[in-house]
Amino acid sequence: MAARLKEFYTNEVAPAMMKKFEYKVISVPRAIPIGAKGYEKMVTEFETNLNKLGAEGWELVQRADDFLFFKREISVE
């Protein structure tokens, strides 16, 4: 019985608990020499792009300097 339980855990349970991720890195400029209207347009476009990434399952996990790091879970079958 214990051997069957160990085999079931090893072959079925453990792999199902191990999530796999893919990653995406986006560069974001710090300073952009544009006027107020251009800035508003840029912010709106950036927000639209972030919403699109979120709809695709990407999650922001870190910002470091000029980079945004995203991850999303991939199915392992």
Image (cartoon, grey):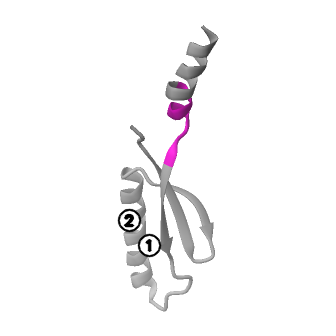
Q: Mark 2 packing: few (<14 Cα in 10 Å), some, or many (20+)?
A: few
| Vertical placement of residue 61 versus 18, above or below | below
Report helix, strand or loop for mark 2: helix
| Vertical placement of residue 42 versus 54, above or below | below
Q: Residue furthest front?
A: 3
Q: Earlier in the sequence, mark 2 or mark 1?
A: 1
Q: Residue furthest top?
A: 1
Q: CA distance from mark 2 to mark 1?
A: 10 Å
* Amino acid type for the residue under numbered disc 1: Val
Tag count in the figure? 2
Image-based side of 35 in relation to 67, left or right: left
Report helix, strand or loop for mark 1: helix
Q: Mark 1 packing: few (<14 Cα in 10 Å), some, or many (20+)?
A: few
* Amino acid type for the residue under numbered disc 2: Asn
Q: Which residues are magenta?
A: 13-20
Q: Residue furthest bottom?
A: 33
Give residue 68's position: percent from left, percent from top. Answer: 54, 68
Residue 39: quadrant of the picture: bottom left
Task: In the rendered structure, find residue 49 and report the number of the disc placed on it.
Answer: 2
Most frequent secondary structure within the magenta stretch:
helix
Task: In the rendered structure, find residue 19 and report the number of the disc placed on it.
Answer: none
**Depth check, front residue: 49 or 64:** 64
- Quadrant position of the N terminus in the picture: top right
Residue at which label 1 appears: 43
Which residue is at a point 44% across and 72% down the rendered structure image? 43
- Quadrant position of the C terminus in the picture: top left
